[in-house]
Amino acid sequence: MRYQSQKIALAYFIVAMALFAVQVTLGLVLGWIYVDGNFLSEVLPFNIGRMLHTNSLIVWLILGFFGAAYFLLPEEAEREIHSSTLAYIQLAILVLGTVGVVLTYFFNLFEGNFLLGKEGREFLEQPKWVKAGIVVAALIFLYNVTMTVLKGRKTAVTNILLLGLWGLALLFLFSFYNPSNLALDKQYWWYVVHLWVEGVWELIMASILAYLMLKLTGVDREVVEKWLYVIVATALFSGILGTGHHYYWIGTPGYWQWIGSIFSSLEVIPFFAMMSFAFVMVWKGRRDHPNKAALLWSLGCATLAFFGAGVWGFLHTLHGVNFYTHGTQITAAHGHLAFFGAYVCLNLAIITYAMPVLKGRDPYNQVLNMASFWLMAGGMTFMTFTLTFAGTVQTHLQRVLGMNYMEVQDQLWVFYVMRFGSGIAVVLGAILFIYSVLAPRREFIEPGPLEKARIDAEHTAAE
């Protein structure tokens, strides 16, 4: 490790992995509630569990992005982080806000209170005081990383990463605007949710993936930067107006059906470009990097993001199709694989690469780490297919034949059982991953002459 301030990333990654464990565990609980609707209904109502599941996902991914920035910026800028103290203060604010959110959701505290109570907006349910804390933490972070880059070397990786991180923080300000008109509320709500995951987060993804390709493959920086700018251009071109595919049925003008259909169809391009970029970099690479697990996660990230966000997103993005599939289990299939492929795999890739460096540990548990990839990727892929089949049946029975919603849910029981089984695989993979990056690997040490004599004596006595 060349720069001492890179150790900041270790604290961020550990907190992120703790929330990752919470997120997948709650996902498994929610999966079983789909099978047995009364499970934990008095202790953990479904709406509270879902809030905790989705919010912990968002928070741990953002913590992973912050940790990745603190890890890679010193190397890219060729200088220490501007202020390590500010970085740890920022983390403390985020942890305090996370605890406050969990307590507020779980115990339903301050119901209806403007400042202290939760809001009824999906993904943005955080109380106002927590949102204010997030803004303060974001301002600290942006000041810290921007000063680091301004005083150091500027590269395409740092420029695109900063653009994505600034966009992430600024777009979050729309979460404070909560108009009483539902159509207007949803229009601005998507400014946060869509323009995050299908806009600025793609810039963060592309920059971190480019950094990993530079380190793992040894490809010339000029080649990586050319690819990076192309990917970013296509992501912004398609992602901004692609927001229109969320405007089909919320009361906005009809022209959004065509704008949303055309531009959201083009959102496949940046994800295909990222997948192509990753594989071409490995093909052109001159370096045989020892961290094969990080390379596996990087390639898996680009591939699963293309299928989850690109292909499965395109499946129901055209308004003529979306009219029937909107809000069915097809949406859930797309959401799960897209988030896992694009952002979960990205964070786990940078953590896999960074942890041996941060902990000064070599060798490390690569075999276990790669096994965790196949467990999680296989489980999530199977989950996506089961939810796709469930959504197809649901669309036909509910939206075409007009059957009652609960009657249709009864027909989907077998798919929910299979989805729960795939969730077990994902949780096991997550546990294996956390163990593989945190626990030291036991090395085989050749016994000396005295140890060999003792072992031989024990064998003789046993015989």
Image: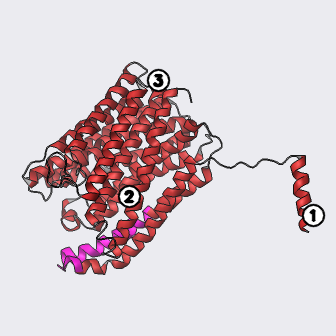
Q: Is residue 202 left or right of residue 426?
A: left
For the residue labelled by badge 1, is the local secondary structure a helix, a strand or a loop? helix
Report how far apart the C-alphas of labels 3 and 2 lie in the structure: 36 Å
Q: Residue at x 86, y 50 (%)?
A: 451
Residue 217 in view here:
no
**Image x and y of residue 225, in percent:** 43, 32
Colour scheme employed for the rendering of this structure: secondary structure
Q: Residue at x 31, y 53 (%)?
A: 102
Ranked by sequence position, the earlier of labels 3 and 2 is 3
For the residue labelled by badge 2, is the local secondary structure a helix, a strand or a loop? helix
Q: Nearer the viewer, residue 294 or 461?
A: 461
Q: Nearer the viewer, residue 317 or 145?
A: 145
Q: Any magenta on residue 410?
A: no
Other residues around mark 2 within 10 Å, as few (<14) / some (14–19) / many (≥20): many
Give the magenta-colored segment's residue range: 380-406
Q: Nearer the viewer, residue 418 or 436?
A: 436
Foreground label between 3 and 2: 3
Q: Are marks 3 and 1 in contact (CB under 8 Å)?
A: no
State the residue position of label 3.
Answer: 80
Q: Residue at x 55, y 39 (%)?
A: 216
Ranked by sequence position, the earlier of labels 3 and 1 is 3
For the residue labelled by badge 3, is the local secondary structure a helix, a strand or a loop? loop
Kind of residue sitting beneath label 1: Thr
State the residue position of label 1.
Answer: 460
Kind of residue sitting beneath label 2: Leu
**Image x and y of residue 108, in percent:** 23, 58
State the residue position of label 2.
Answer: 337
**Image x and y of residue 156, in percent:** 40, 29
Other residues around mark 1 within 10 Å, as few (<14) / some (14–19) / many (≥20): few
Ranked by sequence position, the earlier of labels 1 and 2 is 2
